Image: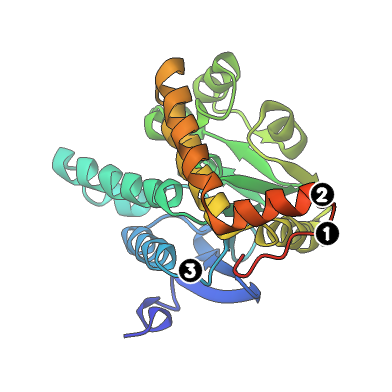
Amino acid sequence: MAESDKLSPALLSRSEDAPGVVRLTLMRPDAFNALSEGLLDALTDALRAIASEPAVRVVVLAGAGRAFCAGHDLREMRASPDHGYYRALFERCTRMMMAIQRMPQPVIARVHGIATAAGCQLVAMCDLAVAAEDARFAVSGVNLGLFCSTPGVALSRNLGRKQAMEMLLTGEMISAAQAQERGLVNRVVPHDRLDAEVAALAASICAKPAAAVAAGKGLFYRQLEMGIEAAYQLAGNTMACNMMDESALEGVQAFLEKRPPTWRNR
């Protein structure tokens, strides 16, 4: 069965923004794209499938309707008040979030409207994020008596500790400009320029050799969890392997010869 056949049109859509750029759109606009069990599974399956597609260079993650993502589906959660169910649900969500980090392609969050709770976590887990000026962000579970513990894992790896704790403890919304200042998003643009900015960022990545991008992304996240000496050892080995790649050999030679590189397969 083709990957497009596996995606439920009621939950997730897949489209091609440009050659090598795939957009996955959360399709629960009436629920502000809340992460139901079905949507979590559809997104996990789609990300894992794309990870093995070398023709895909960049993934754009977007939301249909008025919002990016409002977090978990609270109605669905409240319908099953069982510890085992909740543990399984959050593990399900973690598998989806980690699929973003483990895939070789960079993932760009295209954020508009709100990104709250696990939706804010989703932005933090993406490799890059571009937000509309009117986007707003929060980890607001504490307002309902539920501390956003799992979103806090991703948030604390993007923001400074005190900034992350302030968001987690107060549940207050922050603006797109504040999100950029704190390191949650890369770029903020007017809403009518959001797609153009995402496209420009994706095109910049697609212009680079795929092997270097994939190796670099993998190394980046692994070294973050290491002590500095182990991180340098892993980084040095990664660079040595990267230098033996055809693209790097051509790129360095082109630099020495003062000409543009000619890469056979970016």
Of mark 1 and mark 3, the one earlier in the sequence is 3
Question: Which residue is at the front of the view, 243 or 104?
Answer: 243
User: Residue at horizontal 47%, vertical 39%?
Assistant: 238
Task: Examine the image and state in which quarter residue 230 appears.
Answer: top left
183 relative to 95, above or below: above
- Regarding residue 17, the answer to whether it shows in the image is yes
Asked if residue 180 lies left or right of residue 115, the reply is right
Q: Amino acid at mark 2?
A: Val
Task: Examine the image and state in which quarter residue 15 appears.
Answer: bottom right
Q: Label 3 near label 1: C-beta < 8 Å?
A: no
Q: Quadrant of the C terminus?
A: bottom right
Residue under pointer 1: 193
Q: Which mark is residue 189?
A: 2
Question: Which residue is at the front of the view, 129 or 170?
Answer: 129
User: Residue at horizontal 78%, vertical 57%?
Assistant: 197
Task: Examine the image and state in which quarter residue 94 appears.
Answer: top left
Dot 3, how many residues are within 10 Å of its Cα: few (below 14), some (14-19), or many (20+)? few
